[in-house]
Amino acid sequence: MFGPAAAVAADQPTKTIKTVPAKDTQTLDGKTMFHEYCAVCHGDDGKGNGPAADALKKAPADLTQIARKNGGAFPEVKVQRIITGADDVAAHGNRAMPIWGNIFRSLSGQEGETLRVNALMKYVEGLQAK
């Protein structure tokens, strides 16, 4: 890029994502956990428009379209596996999304991990576009 557009682009600050340790929400409520752990990238509405979205190499997924992209059925196990980090998501490239399974396990053990992942999955299921 050359000319005035290059000068404008050079003046734009580079957006970065500050990583901080996950704090324990002290609740297993899916909505509360979503807003604490997921909304920064996926947005409060789950559409991929969170405040950190612009700093990512790949845009966060619009979580309201999962069922539509899966023939109208919400793939519970697949979503759980993506949350835990068991399955990579091609759109995330080098796995920019945190591996929440490890994080949740460190906060509340194996049983807590399972409960948190299930609560998040159920909350995301409720976000599906009608």
Image: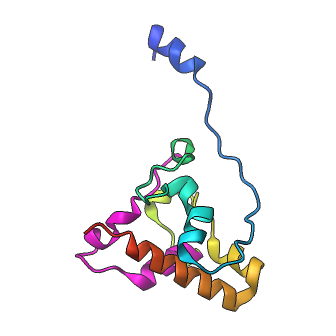
Residue drawn at (47%, 66%) of the image: 89
Q: Is residue 2 visible?
A: no
Give the camera-side residue of 116 and 94: 116
Which quarter shows the N terminus? top left
Across and down, in percent, residue 30 comes to 54, 76
* Residue at the top extreme, as displayed: 3
Q: Is residue 104 visible?
A: yes
Give the camera-side residue of 23 and 27: 27
Residue drawn at (65%, 46%) of the image: 17
The image shows a total of numbered marks equal to: 0
Give the camera-side residue of 92 and 104: 104
Give the camera-side residue of 85 and 37: 37
Across and down, in percent, residue 110 comes to 70, 89
Across and down, in percent, residue 96 comes to 58, 57
Residue 80: within the magenta? yes
Residue drawn at (62%, 31%) of the image: 14
- Please give the range of residues in magenta: 56-84
Vertical arrangement, residue 114 with respect to residue 44, above or below: below
Residue drawn at (63%, 72%) of the image: 100
Which quarter shows the C terminus? bottom left
Vertical arrangement, residue 129 with respect to residue 59, above or below: below
Across and down, in percent, residue 119 comes to 54, 81
